[in-house]
Amino acid sequence: MRGLDTNWDGCVRTIEVGDEVYSMAFSPTDAIIASASAKHGAQLWNSTTGVNIVTLGPSQPPSTPICFSPSGARVALAFEIGLVTVWDTSTARTIINDKECHRRRVTALKFSPNNTTLASASCDKSIRLWEVEIGKTLHRLQHGDSVLCLAFSVDNKIVISGCQGGLCFTWDVESGQLLRKLSGHTKSVNAIAVSGNGVFIASGSNDKAVRVWDLKTGECVRTYANGLGGGVRYVLFTPDGLRVISVCSTYVHSWTLSSHKSFDVLWSKYEYMLQAASHLPAWVGSVARFVPTRLTGYISDQLLEDESDSDFDIRFSPNSNSIALSIMEIVVYSTSWSLRKKPPSFPALGEPTTLALSSDGSQLGSCSATGTIQLWDPSLALKSWSEYSDRIQERVFDITSSADAKRHIISQTNGEFLVGPRGEVIKKLTGSSFSDIKFLFSEGSCMFAYWSRLTLSLNDDATALRVYKSSTGDRLFRVVVSKIGEVALSPDGTLVSCAHDEGVLEVWDVSSGKSLYQFSHESVSCIHFAPDNSKITCGTQIGEIHLWDLRTGDYLAFIKHGTDRISCLAFSPDRYRIAFGCGDGSLHLCYPLPTGLHHSLIPSSKEFPDPPELVLFSPDGTTINCRTLEGVLYTIKVPSQLFETSDSEPIPSSSPSSALCDICISTANQTPISADNWTDSTIANPHIKFTSDKTNVRDAMFRSGYEMHRDGWVYDGDRRILWLPPFARPYHRSALMAYNDKLTIEPNAARVLFIDLGKCY
């Protein structure tokens, strides 16, 4: 493993917005970037330094792409609530801020070429024309259907609109009068463009057709429908005015105005995916070659009947000389229009939500749902399919770490690798496969298990459960079972258990390979061994906990807690307590075992459940650490008043019962527990000693006090230690492993980063 790339990957700057970016735009001079998000509204950024110039607000979900006026002096944004806003970019003064102009969602905004007029369209079946300089409404134009798109004529005298009913309209800007109704489309009109000479209008519709109209007469002079794979999302004229470009969910076409039929395919999603697959590892390319392009297209057409194809976005530079598109996590860029042979591309930071190109196409911007804007230098793009293939094969999909953080299993496209604390490869464990491979280290870190939940292979080895030695990667145990569910290793790695074969929980001895016990039980959701291997417990999908004695094989206890899934459980170090979490977000403690008192440490939250996914006792058993699915960490004090330890195993009671400790009794009548206050109230939660912020990332095993904040800073308590750029930060809540001063991060850049923080002091 070589860690992060030694060569820069084309990303020249990242800008942290702090919220999902809905749209972005370059100013005409390319000096300023405007972004739109629900939390911060409109924001302006210096494109060279990435510094925030101003936040304009409001905090509302935007409904249109943010846009600059042709001069760059104004920036406009509209919102779901019907609000239209325009600001002066030099002074941040609000020019238009009309909450009453539209009664429903605004669908389109467009400045006139001479900067004087703004048009806004809405689902309330109307268009508003504004005099930009004074913010005054000029006209309200009424449609019969929701208006979806707008365009101005080159001479600024006409505004063209397309609506959901399939009609296009031309309106006189000065008088607000309807000039012509253009009928021909049978479904909603999604896009309108005007040719550079002002003679023609192009419209694209969900009826899978592009129509070209004479602006002066309203006559339809061309209809292009042959070869379109879906509803048309964008249309534009080339700068020379000789061709029309159309974009649907699967193709980019170029149509010749002088011909009724001639067209070129500039880009095909099917062709792109097949080319990409053919340059990936041999097993992927072999499968791809067996799938005919026509069949792939037919299947995709059926799946993509809804034209809002979220994994595909396309943008053109204002001068129409450059084109950029994103597909999944790749951004493709070209200045030659043809994207079919060796498309320059960039590995984006997560799946881009939208793209933007500078006025001359020399800068490319992509936004992500994580709240980051990336600026790319097109000259540093990946130029060939082999480079693209190398990136894909090196990509890290997952990392599993041992409790002592000395061993890691890194999953890549080309296999799984056992690596040491500095990323050195100890052993390659698997080759490329279709399997959904899982790994699990023992609590003592000496062993790890490996299995597959899902496989397309008919080989018995693909369904085997294996156990390996962590230090060398040598295999110690293998057994072939089918339909492997949950798996657990004993703390010392001598026992392994899994749920399989429709209702069997089996336990094996690792050294001999002998099956020790088979317990009948279905719907197992989690398994845990007692610290001394004397007991095993499992939770189920229907709120049950079962306990067995591994010395005799006897069934010891049945604990029922509602009907919610048992999401995690753990034995205490003295093996007489069990802590377990449920799907309703609650955490509970049972003592004494095998049956006994049942106490709630975190109450349920039926309205906003955040189920615990990991629970751990401290070595002395006095506290419990818990991590939830959303990444919130808790430290909980075990109530000593209720649960007292003993030197001998307690006598089972006839049935488990509920009980309150002294501190719960004293606070039970003070403040009622509610979904609004329980996570922050120590009165409602007397046992919670620490709660983390879910927006920050901590090591899930509580091995270190280091914490990664959303702004990229690594903290040790209240002290900043190290700042990481966005591409090097953990991309999800369990992608940070900390042990003493060592950090292992699975970052956004799809590599693995090993950091020694001891050298940062």
Image (cartoon, rainbow, N blue to C red):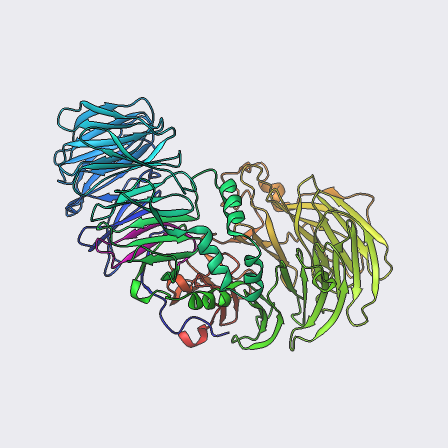
Q: How many marks?
A: 0
Q: Nearer the viewer, residue 663 or 144?
A: 144
- Compared to residue 307, the image places residue 346 above or below, namely below
In the image, residue 447 lies at what x, y percent? 68, 70
Magenta residue span: 348-368
In the image, residue 25 lies at what x, y percent? 26, 49
Q: Nearer the viewer, residue 340 or 540?
A: 340
Give the quadrant of residue 194: top left
In the shown orientation, is residue 565 left or right of residue 174? right
Q: Say which residue appears at 50% left-offset and 72% top-offset.
A: 742
Q: Is residue 80 magenta?
A: no
Camera sees residue 19 = no
Camera sees residue 734 = yes
Q: Say which residue appears at 61% left-offset and 68% top-offset.
A: 431
- Compared to residue 323, the image places residue 247 above or below, namely above
Q: Nearer the viewer, residue 515 or 692?
A: 515
- Quarter containing the C terminus: bottom left
In the image, residue 729 lies at what x, y percent? 43, 62
Q: Nearer the viewer, residue 368 or 163?
A: 163
Q: Is residue 357 magenta?
A: yes
Give the quadrant of residue 186: top left
In the image, residue 737 lies at what x, y percent? 53, 65
